[in-house]
Image (cartoon, grey):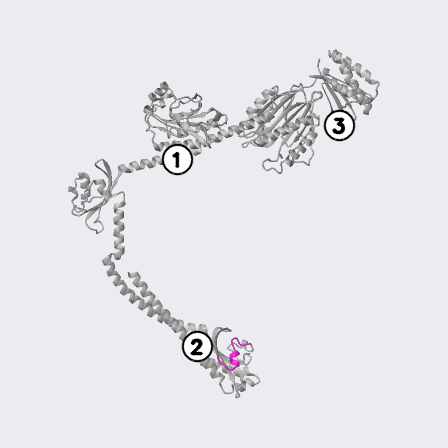
Amino acid sequence: MFLLQLLIVLLLVVAAVVTLVLQARSDRFQAARDRSLAAAQTFAHSPGLVATLHGPDPSKVLQPLTEAARKEAGVDFIVVMNRDGIRYTHPRPELIGKHFIGTIAPSQAGHVTIESVHGPLGEEVQAVVPVEDDHSNVVGLVSSGLKVSSVSSAVDRQLPLVLAAGGAALALATGGAALVSRRLRRQTHGLGPSEMTRMYEHHDAVLHAVREGVVIVGGDGRILLANDEARRLLALPPDVEGQPVTGLGIDPRMAELLASRRVANDEVLPVGDRLLAVNNRPTDRRGGPPGSVATLRDSTELRALAGRAEAARERLKLLYDASVAIGTTLDVQRTAEELTQVASPRFTDYATVDLAEPVLRGDEPRIVGAGSEAPELRRVALSGARDDHPLYRAGEVHRFAAPTPQATGFVSGKAILVPDLSASAGWRTQDVERTQEILDYGFHSLITVPLKARGVLMGIANFWRTEGSDTFEEDDLSLAEELAARAAVCIDNARRFTREHAMAVTLQHSLLPRGLPEQNALDIAYRYLPAQAGVGGDWFDVIPLPGARVAMVVGDVVGHGLHAAATMGRLRTAVQNFSALDLPPDELLGHLDELVGRIDQESAGMDEEAAIAGATCLYAIYDPATGVCAMARAGHPLPALVHPDGSVEFPELPAGPPLGLGGLPFEAGELQLAEGSSLVLYTDGLVEDRKRDIDAGLAILRDTLSRAGRTPEETCDAVISALLPARQRDDIALLVARTRLLPADRSAEWELPSDPAVVSRARSDVTQQLSDWGMDEAAFTTELILSELITNAIRHASGPVRVRLLRDRALICEVADGSSTSPHLRYAAAEDEGGRGLFLVAQLAERWGTRYTPEGKVIWAEQPLP
């Protein structure tokens, strides 16, 4: 009320002061206009002014006169100007001769003008008066005025007086309002009637709504007020107000505390079957009325509520831990084990997981319908406090009988709670002896939850409690369902990954060599380890070539999954086809690069198929007759060469770009390998890992290989043991080849001049060599083959002809000449004189073909050894 009165008085005083200030300002501006007009009119009607204006130098005469008149009239300026507004006088002499600032058109017509303008002296209030001659013609103008700042300063000098009067009025009104408000506040404690009513209603509602008892006792020991909670806790009668505390029949210690007015802090007193925490305070410590107020809290219910809150918190924490701990891998069995480890012992004493056999292979189990029996399940995980329990062990296969909770839950797809196992007749039908052992062991309560995700029913999870643990309740059922649902999604993810991984691995293995081909040039061992997280595109191959030579290839397709495995198969097939043409390593990589480029162009418009660019390859050809190994690589790591003495080097081969980039040629390099040397080809997954760079991997590989006398199998085992990472994220292909040389007594070579007469001599030499080898029965066929090949070389080529005979797994005849043209097999017509010799060679030999060399070509033919 006081603030309202004060606000009204303040508004009245402020309004009065503002009115006085505005009125004073208006009066001052009107006085300034009147003074300016009087000064201007007086000077305009001065005698002799017209004559002076017509004189030769009006400024000289009028400037001192206007300054004197300005000071006498109390104005800021008097300006005399001609009819066009050109000044003759001004308080600032430098402005004489300048054009007057203001409105002069009305004055030029004989009228008086009063206005406010922004002139040379600032904001000005000025009057413009015409100067007329005897014929009422305007011959000049006179302007007089005051600056606005001069008028405002005069008003400001009056303002303190006005404000002082307003302040005095405000102080007087405030004092009166304060006296009235003080008296009202003393009587109403500062509240109005509605506020007091509302406060009482709020206090009464709060007092009876709180879950804490409130008892107010007067100084005479009688109860003044008791809320609803206090009546309930103390069992007070409805008319308790006004009765003495000691006559209510409550516990004597409680009655003594309420009547004593002593201070108590959370003092626990028994009242019937309750324990009440009592706080008591006297009410007269600060001048209040005598008495006390006590608050009562039921600590029994608070403890139960705190226990439920703690249980809820533990369940939330268990679910959070389960979301973190379950599904850390994509392994079905490991995921099931994580579920049992999270549940036991925090939720249950024992936890088991049983899955259908197809789930472990990544397949979907058969659909179970109503009335069906549960399929055979394998226990894949079990966790509990002790290991001497009678439950099915991990790895055992069993089938739950139809009446059991496990079978019922699996078929229905719903969780089942069995609070008392001893009273469950259906549960005992599984195995009477085993179930009795389970009961004797102490198992008394069970929750079984089907593991179902994305419509796939995979198995069941069982939660068991033994002696010393509470019986499962409905709240526990919801928690078990939540745990099982989270685990089911993770198990299904692992199952799907297992299926896809198995498909990819199967495809990958089908595209890799099933075994090593038979050959005598190299002693070979290999290791192929697919990545744990998904198959990749690494591959290797060993390809026998004509002339007892052997080609070795190792490649890597960037990426993982089915696409990488399929791409690897395409490249491996292409390498086998190109090697059948007996191309040098650099030319073969060139053709392979063109093939990859064409494949990328074909898949450029298909979003679902990625490009192959980034595939690497190393191709090597070893010739046991000479010990020379020719190699070329396309972005692939360098091979390791282990000399017979155990020293290791990484020969510097010309580096080529990865396959699919195109535009750059490949270059081959040659190594002269001693017998017993080992050539180690590998993919980058062997030496490179997220925790180890390639330089460190190569250093470990060098140290591992630097031992003489190991077989290729022993070398593979040592390398894999030293370099296999704990978490293999990429495929590993390793190929170890120890060289052999073809013995000198197993080859014979002749150089013949280009003369048909030497054919007979060559036949005899070959026959003699075959006789020395004990192969007389092959002499006739070999003579025919060599005769045709040598005759063709002499007839169609130039230069000497070289003949070489090799005895390896087959009898190999080679005829080399300087021509780059190759003969073609065809059917000769009846009238043709030639064309039948090559047909004869093809019929007599098991295989034949042509390979090109820098000097020309070699035509070869193979016969099986007799």
Is 859 on the left-hand or right-hand side of 525? right
Confirm or deny contact between disc 2 and disc 1 (CB under 8 A).
Answer: no
Q: Residues within 10 Å of mark 2 (few under 14, many from 20)?
A: many
Confirm or deny contact between disc 3 and disc 2 (CB under 8 A).
Answer: no
Is 415 on the left-hand or right-hand side of 238? right
Which quadrant does the C terminus fall into? Answer: top right
Q: Which mark is residue 32?
A: 2
**Magenta segment:** 99-112
Was residue 103 drawn as part of the magenta stretch in this picture?
Answer: yes
User: Where is residue 723 shown, x and y percent of the image?
Assistant: 56, 26
CA distance for labels 3 and 2? 121 Å
Which quadrant does the N terminus fall into? Answer: bottom left
Q: Residues within 10 Å of mark 1 (few under 14, many from 20)?
A: few
Q: Which mark is residue 317?
A: 1
User: Where is residue 228 shown, x and y percent of the image?
Assistant: 23, 44
Which structural element holds mark 2?
Answer: helix
- Residue holding disc 3: 854
